[in-house]
Image: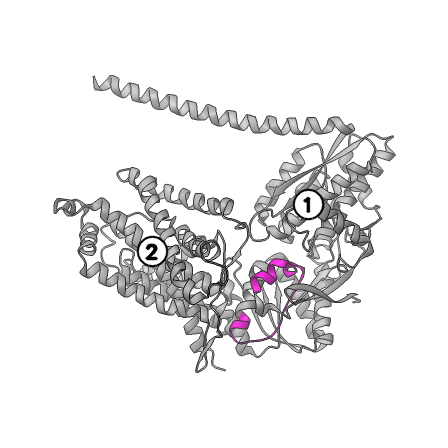
Amino acid sequence: MNELPQQLVNGLLLGSMYGLVAIGYTMVYGIVQLINFAHGEIFMTGAFGALTVYLYVLPDGTTMWIALPLMLVGAIFVAVTVAVGAERFAYRPLRTAPRLAPLITAIGLSLALQQAVWAWYPNAKSARTFPQIEGGPFEIGSVTIQTGDVFLFIAAPISMAVLAYFVMKTRTGRGMQATAQDPDTAKLMGINTDRIIVVAFALGAAFAAVGGLAYGLKYGQIDFRMGFILGLKAFTAAVLGGIGNIYGAMIGGVVLGLAETMATAYIADVPGMSQLGGQSWANVWAFVLLILVLLFRPQGLLGERVADRA
Amino acid sequence: MPGKGLLIVRQRSLIAITAALAAGALTLTACGSRDEDGGGSDSNGGGTTVVIGVDAPLTGDLSALGLGIKNSVDLAAKTANKEKTVDGVTFKVEALDDQAQPSSGQQNATKLVADKDVLGVVGPLNSSVAESMQKVFDDAKLVEVSPANTNPALTQGTKWNGGEKARPYKSYFRTATTDAIQGPFAAQYVFNDAKKKSVYVIDDKKTYGAGLAATFTEEFKKLGGKVVGTQHIDPDTKDFSAVATQVKSSGADVVYYGGEYPQAGPLSKQIKAAGAKIPLVGGDGIYSADFIKLAGASGTGDLATSVGAPVEDLPSAKEFVSAYKAAGYKEAYEAYGGYSYDSAWAIIEAVKKVVEDNDGKLPDDARAKVTEAMQGVTFDGVTGKVAFDEFGDATNKQLTVYSVEGGTWKPVKSGTYEG
């Protein structure tokens, strides 16, 4: 059986999830030049927000078709609240501080959020099961798509389209572009940059929440550490695509997801490489790819103006 | 005067820093003195206090197993105190969390060695953690009894498979059976009883998982089975879709996984979701209620081997199960409860012998004496007769195959592996 189409779909799905989380890294970086390492935990709180709605808000046995939109709202609400709170109380006081200070704060916040969920969310000390959408998998030719993945397949492109429309066409979106280009001039032009920064954090969190819900549906379990590795991967995706570029984040995510999947599936078949194949080496190959891209295109796949920033 | 203003600010921040440091120091000393107080008040009751250390993952993915170990040791200590098993000695349990990390395990080992009251340690759960702890304990001649480590190299040296068995550390014992027996036992069951002839072998590259997968593969091939694919997964991820697709296209009729339940659960689920409706077989590392939770409904029919006969079926274990229930622990005793109780009891027996040989008092070199006494300990424990061979391995080599049915692990077949 030819497994390539299935592996491509696997990679695309994994990559879409990386992309959804990567958008938050890239938007915040584009506007305040902060690598928000707590973003992986925002993704995690989003997933727990969705679970909370399902477990404690909705009556038992609600069908997923009704529960899903409400869980999405819950996920976005929790993630945005945490992100905006983090911006207001952790990052804003440090806006004029040297760049290392907010970076360290972000790492600290990441640990604090993990431990807070670990300590206070009921039974979150080990993985919690996440509700699943009923119904069997869909077969399209030789490709199987899980019911839980359908959400991701639909949500990722829609999210991307909404984001593109928002940034390009709306007043706030243009204000974001202006602030990213030059915050001081943008301020002189009458743009409320504080508000723009909050919007950037909130939008990034909302996309991470969509990703968090998709993660729960896809894998059927969430835990307090789920955001750490996935956040790192999403950050890698953002760098791969060109940090600061929102389309780059999505492309970078998909490229990274495909690279990992292909490495898992095929590297071991290359003659002489059987020791260097398999999933345990997938990360190595993904990062080899990252290094190669950065060697030849230091600004990332779609990046534009990182050189004068970093 | 700007200069003066600056000075004041500096002084203020200096005061703030000093205050913070002082507060920090106070908190630290407070912690220290509290610990000492705790030890002191306990020892008033029964003359001498002997601490049994516990090292296990008490938080994180594997905490279900780790907390079961901790509670079972606690139960053993309480039972010994109540029954006055050792005259004049009160047992106390000090449990440390290793988060399944070898580095944390070694720190914990150092910490336990530093506490002079510790005369024995139960743990750890993970073979990889044990590797980092063995030398620390051995240097201090502190006895360590693991209820769960199954890697053969821990007791028989790294060349155990080449016929050159050599015990690396005299202070290390275990009540669990080794992978040298568990892997082949699983292979025989899968090939002879379940009649599966082609296997896809997956492991997590950790000491336990890779070792188990290797011994399984060897025996399975010897029996005439075919290994149609191998894969090593990254235990940090939950996305096994690429691996699952490979399993499906390989046409295997069974998957063997060397590793633990946090990965095995999602792996089993994703393999079945990919369309390969074949059972996943694992070792004692997946024999946990959490595996069933993580694998979901499609996990029905998955198999696990675990050391010993089913705890619930042994007459000697009935007492343990009811005492555990009566003690009201929040967490279940899980796969290693009985072995942990027996491990702790072995330490208690060794301490008893040392105390009795020394006219009812602990000798000065109590640690070395306890380690020596451990070699000769035999008693009827929760899991059957507990005794150790010349390598420190349990002489009880029984294993059981369990299968997931109706949301619980049901014992399918018990037996011993004959090489």
Residue A96: percent from left, percent from top: 26, 38
Image quadrant of residue A287? Answer: bottom left
The range drawn in magenta is B271-295
Residue at the disc numbered 2: A206
Report in which chain the residue with disc 2 lies: A
Rendered position, B163 above or below B219? above
Number of other residues with Cα within 10 Å of mark 1, as a class: few under 14, some 14 to 19, many 20 or more: few
Quarter of the picture holding the C terminus of chain B = bottom right
B281 displayed left or right of B359:
left
Q: Label for residue B328?
A: 1
Which of the colour schemes (rainbow, by chain, secondary structure, one colour) is used? Answer: one colour
Residue drawn at 32 percent across, 67 percent down: A157
Q: Quadrant of residue A5?
A: bottom left
> What chain letter is assigned to the residue under label 1?
B
Would you say residue B232 is visible in this rendering? no
Q: Position of residue A92 (x, y in %)?
A: 29, 40
**Going by the image, does A202 lie left or right of B225?**
left
* B140 sits left or right of A205 in the view: right
Depth-wise, is mark 1 or mark 2 nearer the camera?
1
Q: Which quarter of the rendering shows the N terminus of chain B?
A: top left
Amino acid tagged 2: Ala
B291 in the magenta segment:
yes
